[in-house]
Every structure is written in C-alpha cells, then in structure tokens.
Image (cartoon, rainbow, N blue to C red):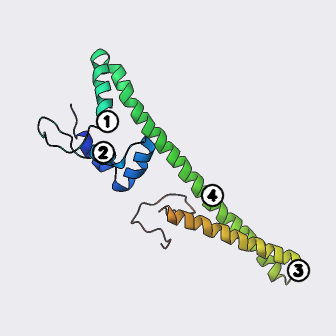
Amino acid sequence: MILSRPFHEILHLAITPRLIEPIARRLGVQSDTIRAWRREPPNDDNPHGSGARSPLHRTATIIEEVHQDSPSDARMIANSFVELCDGLDERRRRERRRQSGDLTEAVAINLKEQSEALVLLIKGEITQETLREVDEAVQAVTNLRELVKEHLREGRAERIIHGSSTSPGHSTGIRH
C-alpha cells in the first residue's frame, strides 16, 4: 500500500483513549477491537504484531480494486470521505455560531431585563410591576449563568461580542 503513514498509526493518533468507548458503542464492537486497530497488525515485516486490520484496511482494499478498473471511481470513493469531513466541519461551525448566538442573545435579554428593573427602581416606583421586573431580571441572570456554565463544561470559551472561538491556552478574559 502507498501511504505516508500506516493505518494503525493514523488511528492511534486520531482515536484518543477517551474516544475508544464512544466509537466502540457506535460501531457495536468491543473497545478492545478499537484498541487493536490502533496497534500494528501482523504482517510480513512484523509477524508478531498484536493489532488487527481496521475498517480503513477494507476501505483501502475496495479503493485499490475499483482503481484497477476506474481510477476516477476510486477517487470518487476517496473524495466522499473528504466531503463527509467538510460537511461535519460545516455542521460544527453552524452549531458553534448558533451556541455563540444563544449566549449573545442571553446577554442581550439579561441587559434588557436588568435595565427595565433598574429604571423603575431609579424612579422610586416600588410596585408589583417593579417586583415582576426584578423577578424577570433574576431569571435572565439565572439563564445566562446556566449558558455560561454549559460553555465551560464543554470546554468552550468564546468572545461574546465577536462570537469568535478561542483556542485552548489563549486568554479570553473568562475565568475557568
């Protein structure tokens, strides 16, 4: 096979230990199977390899066989995986934009509710309406707090005003 890196090395790098269980569940296999795919399988150079051939090996075999008949069809198969990754990237970008928008919207709602309550209090209007506005402001703060906690649990820190994600290790002004 003509690869810059063997499949078991690719899988060892790409499937981190924390991903083994979720991938195994999703594929309906034992986690040991996933671990075996991450090790070198037996081959002519290493007959004692403790790994196992992975689905990448089967996919490569399909591509090799199709390529003998039609290189363009083989490339179509390979490109379908690139298209899949592109689609997943786009879905992730949309979800992050939506979540960032949710946080931005929560900040806006919080400011609105706080302002309405403060205006009534500054005017000296201590009424049932003022109490309702204060309750709405408290609820808006609670909702905002939950969204921020969710972002922190997911390991995402974002600049609210710009909506741009920051990579780990870069300062965002948000304390963890």
Amino acid on which the number 3 mark rests in the picture: Thr
What residue did someone put label 2 on? 11
**Which residue occupies the foreground of this view, 64 or 128?**
64
Residue shown at 49% from the left, 73% from the top: 175
Q: Looking at the picture, how far across and down is residue 112, in whole percent?
A: 73, 68
Query: Where the N terminus falls, by quadrant?
Result: top left
Q: Is residue 159 in sight in this rendering?
A: no
Direction left: furthest residue: 45
Using residue 117 as the reference point, say whether residue 147 is left or right of it.
left
Instruction: Find the distance from the CA under tag 4 to the CA under tag 2.
Output: 35 Å
Tell whether 147 sits left or right of 9. Answer: right
Q: Secondary structure at mark 1?
A: helix
Q: Select label 4 or label 2 by which is in front.
A: 2
In terms of secondary structure, where does tag 3 sit? loop
- N-terminal of the pair, mark 1 or mark 4, is 1
Of circles 3 and 1, the one toward us is 1
Which mark is in front, 1 or 4? 1
Distance Cα–Cα, label 2 vs label 1? 9 Å
Residue 65, disc:
none
* Residue 47 seen in this snapshot: yes
State the residue position of label 1: 56
Q: Which residue is mark 3?
A: 127
Between discs 4 and 2, the one toward the N terminus: 2
The amino acid beneath tag 2 is Leu
Q: Contact (CB < 8 A) between labels 2 and 1?
A: yes
